[in-house]
Image: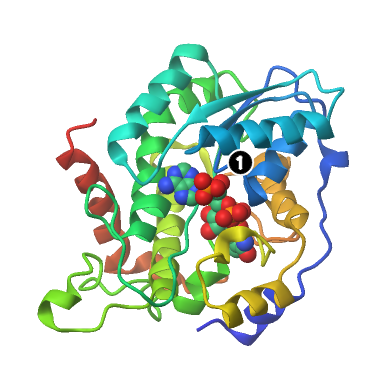
Amino acid sequence: MPTLSSSWTNTFPPKPAFTENDVPDLDHKVYLVTGANAGLGKELAQMLYAKHAKVYIAARSSEKAAAAISAIQAAAPSSRGALVFLPLDLADLSTIKAATQRFLAAETQLHVLWNNAGVMTPDSGPLTRTPQGLELNLGVNCVGAMLLTKLLTPILAATAAVSPPDTVRVVWLASFGTEMFAAKDIGVDLDVIAYTQEKKGEKVPPGTARYGISKAGVWALAVELGRRYGIVSVPLNPGNLRTELFRDQAGAFRLMTRAIGYPVRYGALSQLYAGLAPDVTAEGLEGNWGMLSLSFPLSLFLSFFLSFFLSFCPLRVKRLRLT
Ligand SMILES: NC(=O)c1ccc[n+]([C@@H]2O[C@H](COP(=O)([O-])OP(=O)(O)OC[C@H]3O[C@@H](n4cnc5c(N)ncnc54)[C@H](OP(=O)(O)O)[C@@H]3O)[C@@H](O)[C@H]2O)c1
């Protein structure tokens, strides 16, 4: 469970300390935002495009991507930037390599990757799995994002080599849900991760708990990417926002998220800060509207879970012989 101070900060965050006004022109910058057709991702893409960046709108639906691109263009008609649709379904690992190949065929640089796309399964109802048999939250939020990032790491590293220090980054969307729903102190119970409880006649954790567990995994992936590759890798809790993330939850849950949620813009500003603010470095910082590093127990980081989880994701990917 979250601490009182963490719950308070999430419910009443400080004012944004970094906004579009602090962002210089982004001509010649190349960014990739997953899930950029809706919610925080779309708002962020608009902020970047308005500053003349080239933004890849990674989305699983061409219709939704086209609608988002039209809306963003209409909102920033004087932009010198570009918006490019990149088909990407993070639930199906077999499609991710094609998406990155498409990107790599067109670009020689990638300045920031925002692993924004995410899913939250309904609290009740049957457990949903990806085509590769992973629990859906884990598959999309962790394993899919990890494979995408792994395939883009060489271009990120190459871009970092010719860019000012700490400016090439990967931003990962973690969540307050980790503190709310993930297993106390460890983030995830190791016996749970394959979600085979039903076979043993045991109860499967509810959808929101599975979401929280996956977001603990996101946090772990973010920390480890920074350690291994020296790219600034930022796990971000963007705050509580009014988006479609909760569309599959029961009415009372949706009402509660509406009541405590803030306009989408604030979540996008959190992402803007994590991706572009000059005071964000490899060490990370707390502050601003969202929280860069979760006030999550350090014991999670030190736990066996982390090493298990970090071998779990690549293992799933390797089995498919994709890399
Ligand atoms: N809203 C909050 O309060 C809150 C709080 C903490 C963290 N977050 C995180 O913020 C991120 C953005 O969420 P949001 O609030 O903006 O929700 P949203 O409006 O539901 O947007 C989620 C985006 O992810 C995309 N997505 C879902 N599954 C995908 C898949 N398999 N492949 C590719 N894209 C996929 C969605 O595409 P479709 O439109 O096709 O479904 C959509 O573009 C998520 O990672 C979420 O967990 C949100």
Side of 182 where 245 appears, left or right: right
Q: Nearer the viewer, residue 119 or 233?
A: 119
What colour scheme governs how the chains and residues are painted in the rendered image of this protein?
A: rainbow
Q: What residue sits 87% from the left and 22% below the top?
A: 78
**For disc 1, does the CB lie below 8 Å from ligand 1?**
yes
Residue 112 seen from this side: no
Q: Nearer the viewer, residue 94 or 194?
A: 94
Residue 182 image offset from top left, x and y in percent: 42, 74
Residue 165 location, quadrant: top right
Residue 105 image offset from top left, x and y in percent: 44, 13
Q: Nearer the viewer, residue 222 or 99?
A: 99
Q: What residue sits 41% from the left and 27% below the top?
A: 99
Tell me the residue that label 1 is attached to.
37
Q: What residue sits 71% from the left and 50% below the top?
A: 268
Side of 131 where 140 appears, left or right: right
Q: What residue sits 27% from the left and 35% below the top?
A: 94
Residue 247 image offset from top left, x and y in percent: 56, 64
Residue 308, placed above or below residue 83: below
Residue 94 seen from this side: yes
Q: For the view shown, which residue lies furthest in the left direction?
A: 200
Local crowd size for mark 1, using a 10 Å CA cut-off: few (<14), some (14–19), many (≥20): many
**Residue type, numbered disc 1:** Asn
Residue 209 image offset from top left, x and y in percent: 41, 75
